Image (cartoon, rainbow, N blue to C red):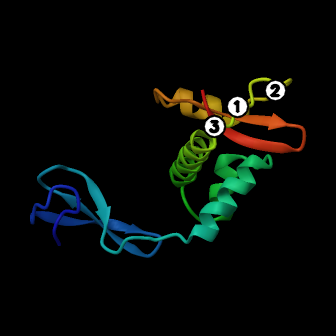
Amino acid sequence: MECKHCGCGATRKNGVSKGYQRYVCNGCKRTFSGTPIKFSNKIKNNAVFMVLNGVGIRTTATILKTSHVNVLNWLKNANKILLESLERHNTDFSDEIDVIEMDEIYTTVKKGGNDSPFGLLTLGEKSVLLRL
């Protein structure tokens, strides 16, 4: 098996996760699955929907049978798409915002030492994920 990160051919088996063989590279020491696990856009959209509607990140991950890291990555991607869309349409909500609620995602990402924390903005019955 060739390493998916550095291309090195010196890899060894490193257990099994969710039915997929795991490998570790002797060159770069990173681990990877023999067969990539692909999630549909429907599952990713469901994850974003669940978090925006008050389900915790780890609970969402458990329900969708994935890791909390995947859920966070999907949320970051959804935020990126939202920001690009807002920039294209020159949308500015600054005059309309009265109350801002921050969800657990802010503390989770911030604790991880990430330079780009995220928050959940609630406007009436609508919620959007924001990068702070």
**Disc 2 and disc 3 in contact, CB within 8 angstroms:** no
Picture coordinates of residue 40 (x, y %)?
55, 72
Looking at marks 2 and 1 on the same chain, the residue that comes earlier in the sequence is marked by: 1
Task: Name the residue: 62% across, 67% down.
Answer: 43
Calculate the distance from the C-alpha at mark 1 to the C-alpha at mark 3: 6 Å
Q: Amino acid at mark 3?
A: Asn
Residue closer to the observer: 86 or 112: 86
**Disc 1 and disc 3 in contact, CB within 8 angstroms:** yes
Count neighbours of disc 2 (C-alpha within 10 A) and say few if under 14, some if 14 to 19, many if 20 or more: few
Q: Amino acid at mark 2?
A: Ile
Reply above or below: 54 against 132. Answer: below
Residue highlighted by disc 3: 90
Task: Name the residue: 46% across, 26% down.
Answer: 115
As drawn, is 5 to the left or to the right of 65? Answer: left
Tag nearer the camera, 2 or 3: 3
> Which quarter of the image is occupied by the N terminus?
bottom left
Calculate the distance from the C-alpha at mark 2 to the C-alpha at mark 3: 16 Å
Reply above or below: 50 against 19. Answer: above
Q: Which mark is residue 97?
A: 2
**Disc 2 and disc 1 in contact, CB within 8 angstroms:** no
Picture coordinates of residue 73 (x, y %)?
51, 49
Q: Which mark is residue 92?
A: 1
